[in-house]
Structures are given as structure tokens and as C-alpha cells.
Amino acid sequence: MEILAGILIVVILGLGYVVFNLNRKVIKQEGVIEYQVGYLRNVAYLISESKIYIEQLDEKGAFRSDDEVGVFFNFMKEIQETINAYRLPEDYGKTTK
């Protein structure tokens, strides 16, 4: 009977260590995820701001497509349209509790 109690105590302590270790790793990964979400939000903000800026420049019609600057500007608009596909939704990374 004492051997069975000793084995049970060792198993309980082993499982307690496993749970403690896994919880510590989850907490560490939550910090990494929060950092990455913040980074992605900053990138999404920059994408949105650059879209607005390019649209403002395009409204003025300051760049014509018949010169080198105009060709480059049209290329930049195409790049911006491609980048716009990677914008994040407004509620990305917000916790729902």
C-alpha cells in the first residue's frame, strides 16, 4: 500500500511539473503573439496611410504618364494596389473575452 502511495505521489508531482512547464511556455508565447500583432497593426497602418497619400497625389494630377516620373508614379500605384490586399481588418488581434 505504501508503494502505491509513493508511486501516486511521484506521478502527481510529475504531472504538476508538466502542467507548470506548459503554462510557462504558453505565457511566453502570448507575449510573442502580442508583439507580432502590434507589429502587424503598425504595418497595416502604414499601408493605409500610403494608400491615402498616393490617392491625394493622384487627385492633383501632378504626374503625367508620358514622362519618366509619371511612369514611375503609375508603377507605384500598381504596387500600392497589390499591397492593399494585405491590409488587416480593424479588429485584428483584439481579444474577445
Image (cartoon, helix red, strand yellow):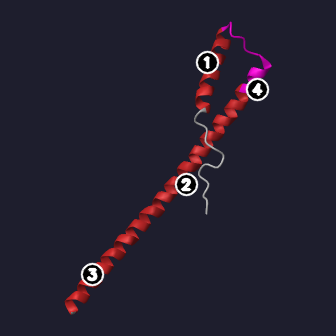
Q: What stretch of residues is rendered in magenta?
A: 55-67
Asked whether disc 2 touches disc 3, contact meaning CB atoms under 8 Å apart, the reply is no
Measured in 3D between alpha carbons, the distance from the residue under mark 4 to the one under mark 2, in whole angstroms, is 33 Å
What residue would you read off at disc 1? 75
Amino acid at dot 4:
Gln
Q: Which residue is mark 2?
A: 34
Q: Quadrant of the C terminus?
A: bottom right
Q: Which residue is mark 3?
A: 10
Q: Earlier in the sequence, mark 4 or mark 2?
A: 2
Contact, mark 4 vs mark 1 (Cβ under 8 Å):
no
Q: Secondary structure at mark 4?
A: helix
Graded by Cα atoms within 10 Å as few (under 14), some (14 to 19) or many (20 or more), the crowding at tag 2 reads few
* Residue 57 belongs to the span the image colors magenta: yes
**Residue ID for mark 4:** 56
Q: Amino acid at mark 3?
A: Val
In the rendered image, residue 43 lying in the magenta stretch gets the answer no
- Which comes sooner in the sequence, label 1 or label 3? 3
Q: Residue at x 73, y 14 (%)?
A: 63
Could you say whether the residue bearing mark 2 is in a helix, strand or loop?
Answer: helix
Report the number of numbered marks.
Answer: 4
Quarter of image, res 57: top right
Circle 2: residue type: Glu
Q: Amino acid at mark 1?
A: Phe
